[in-house]
Image (tube, rainbow, N blue to C red):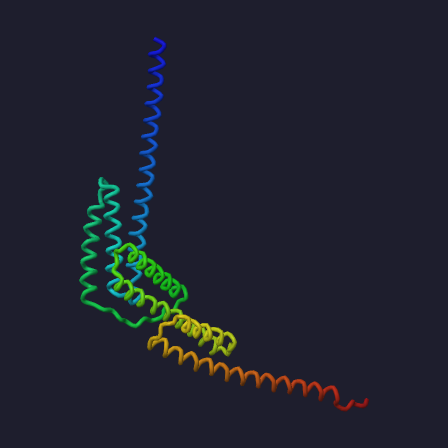
Amino acid sequence: MVAIIIGLLITLIIFVVVVSAIQQHKEKQDAEKRVKVAKQKAIIDESEELILNLSNIPASPNIAQILNKRCLNAAKEMQKLMPDVTGLKKKISALKSRLDAAEDLAASQNNEANFILPDNEKQILATLQCIKKLRAILKSEQSKGALDPSTFTQEDQRLDAMQLKINIESLLKRGCQAQNKEMFGSARQYFEKALQTLENHGKKTEYTTAKNAEITTLLEEITESLKITNASDAARKAKSEENELDILFQPKKKW
């Protein structure tokens, strides 16, 4: 009788341990699934936000196609992880339609619109951040095999040129503003930084060649302005010292 009770207790303990292990394994799987789902949801949110921001930059239609395809792939992964969740099927259908529209646009257009630098510094920063995110996504998609190397190179070079243009035009704008205020030292720093940025970029284009010549001319103007300013300051200082000497050695009045 005692042996039976002990046997039952051991069986019960083993059962509890097994059930607990199964429960822990299930909880671990659920936790891992939630992490994976959250990752795919973040991919969709990031991609859709960037799609909305494409209106602020002259991005190639290929970019919209890549981002929409990224959204669709993420939604499909979510459906695999959560096949019973309602709404995902409709979301996937909508993303497929949006991708088809983006593919048609990419096939019929080649947007080479001239980029106009935003007036607001906050907008400039937001545009730069958008471009950097797009370049990071392109690299990620290419490394995963979701983007062919030729398209990656073409689009990355386009975004790189746009990023360079924003940096150069922003520095030139600040430099010219300082120059107009006769803050020649600050203006020269902005122009020299822009020139160094062009030199560090390496790739020569019509834009970089033209800007190199423009900035070199501006720096020459700054140098001449500084010479004139220094000469004027020296003349004023000499005149001031001369007046002080005249006052010091002028004849004493007799009272």
Query: Is 169 in front, or is 23?
Result: 23
| Residue that protrudes farthest toward the top in the picture | 1
Q: What x and y, as percent, mark residue 146?
A: 25, 56
Image point (44%, 80%), residue name: 218
Say if 137 sits above or below 253 in the image.
above
Residue 202, quarter of the rendered image = bottom left
Image point (25%, 47%), residue name: 77
Quadrant the C terminus occupies: bottom right
Residue 234, quarter of the rendered image = bottom right
Q: What x and y, as percent, mark residue 247?
A: 72, 87
Say if 217 sits above or below 84 in the image.
below
Residue 245, quarter of the rendered image = bottom right
Say if 159 sits above or below 220 in the image.
above
In-image side of 235 versus 211 (left or right): right
Q: What x and y, as percent, mark residue 48?
A: 28, 55
| Whether residue 233 can be seen here | yes
Q: What x and y, as percent, mark residue 161?
A: 34, 69
Quadrant the N terminus occupies: top left
In-image side of 106 versus 249 (left or right): left
Image point (21%, 53%), residue name: 95
| Whether residue 173 can be seen here | no
Image point (32%, 59%), residue name: 139
| Residue that protrudes farthest toward the right in the picture | 255
Say if 255 sits above or below 95 in the image.
below
Count up the numbered dots: 0
